[in-house]
């Protein structure tokens, strides 16, 4: 089982990922539960994360370089950790996936969707999430939470940019292959209220999956 939580900082997706992993460990103590994040999750992928998100350079990074670095971290994570875990029937809970590149990098870097999708298809290959939880929160609300300096290099940009990203995330609901994978989770309210929403969506998804 490969479950992904998507959207931005201050929708509490990282917190919810950890709480969901703890819930699965309590419910299925015999199952291995692995928590990961993108970019990162392995030694090499974490090094790429530092390079692409935590390093200031004298020169400007090329948009193509940026996209390939994120995809490289993704490929490393899937190849060395996620695929072997799924083969062991582990439950994998991921903070972000390729959707971040399709939405955020597409808008941020101004490159065509086909190019971004092609690069990420090479990284992902056939390792697709079973379900993607979109932590849905009004843009103005999360901007009020996040403009304290937190967030990655894209999430620190201005409001117009953030609204544009949200629009493209919405478009992913209609794109193959994400259209059938994404489930919307109401991310407003307290951490516990949001987690209740996460569990409700997961349980409904699981029930529908079992019923074919």
Image (cartoon, rainbow, N blue to C red):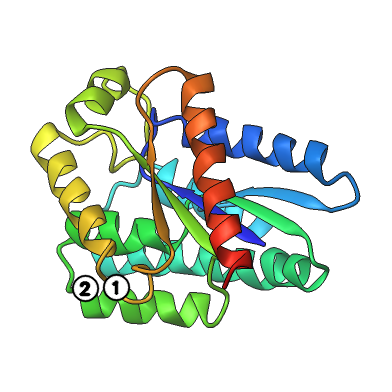
Please tell me which residue is depicted at 91% across the width and 50% down the height of the picture: 30
Label 1 close to label 2 by CB (< 8 Å): yes
Residue corresponding to mark 1: 116
Assess disc 2: are there few (<14), some (14-19) or many (≥20) residues with their C-alpha within 10 Å of its C-alpha: some
Residue 9, image x and y in percent? 39, 33
Please tell me which residue is depicted at 79% across the width and 66% down the height of the picture: 89
Figure check: 103 above or below 17: below
Q: Quadrant of the N terminus?
A: bottom right
Figure check: 35 above or below 180: above
Quarter of the image where one finds residue 168: bottom left
In this view, which residue lies farthest toward the left? 160
Residue corresponding to mark 2: 113
Quarter of the image where one finds residue 142: top left
Quarter of the image where one finds residue 55: top left
Figure check: 144 above or below 86: above
Figure check: 14 above or below 179: above
Assess disc 1: are there few (<14), some (14-19) or many (≥20) residues with their C-alpha within 10 Å of its C-alpha: many
Please tell me which residue is depicted at 76% across the width and 65% down the height of the picture: 85
**118 left or right of 122?**
left
Residue 165, image x and y in percent? 20, 49
Residue 78, image x and y in percent? 62, 68
Q: Quadrant of the C terminus?
A: bottom right
Local SS, label 2: helix
Local SS, label 1: helix
């Amino acid at each position: 089982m490969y479950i992904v939580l998507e959207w931005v900082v201050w929708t509490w997706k990282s917190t919810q990922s950890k709480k969901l992993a703890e819930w699965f460990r309590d419910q299925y103590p015999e199952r291995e539960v692995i928590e990961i994040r993108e970019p990162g999750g392995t030694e090499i992928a974490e090094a790429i994360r530092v390079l692409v998100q935590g390093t200031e350079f004298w020169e400007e990074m090329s948009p193509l370089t940026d996209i390939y670095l994120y995809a490289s971290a993704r490929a490393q994570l899937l190849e060395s950790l996620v695929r072997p875990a799924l083969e062991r029937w582990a439950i994998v809970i991921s903070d972000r996936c390729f959707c971040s590149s399709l939405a955020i990098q597409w808008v941020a870097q101004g490159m065509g969707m086909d190019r971004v999708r092609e690069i990420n298809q090479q990284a992902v290959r056939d390792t697709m999430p079973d379900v993607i939880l979109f932590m849905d929160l009004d843009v103005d609300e999360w901007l009020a939470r996040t403009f304290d300096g937190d967030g990655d290099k894209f999430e620190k940009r201005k409001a117009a940019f953030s609204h544009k990203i949200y629009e493209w995330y919405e478009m992913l609901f209609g794109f193959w292959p994400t259209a059938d994978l994404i489930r919307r989770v109401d991310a407003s309210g307290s951490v516990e209220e949001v987690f209740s929403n996460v569990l409700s969506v997961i349980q409904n998804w699981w029930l529908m999956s079992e019923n074919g």
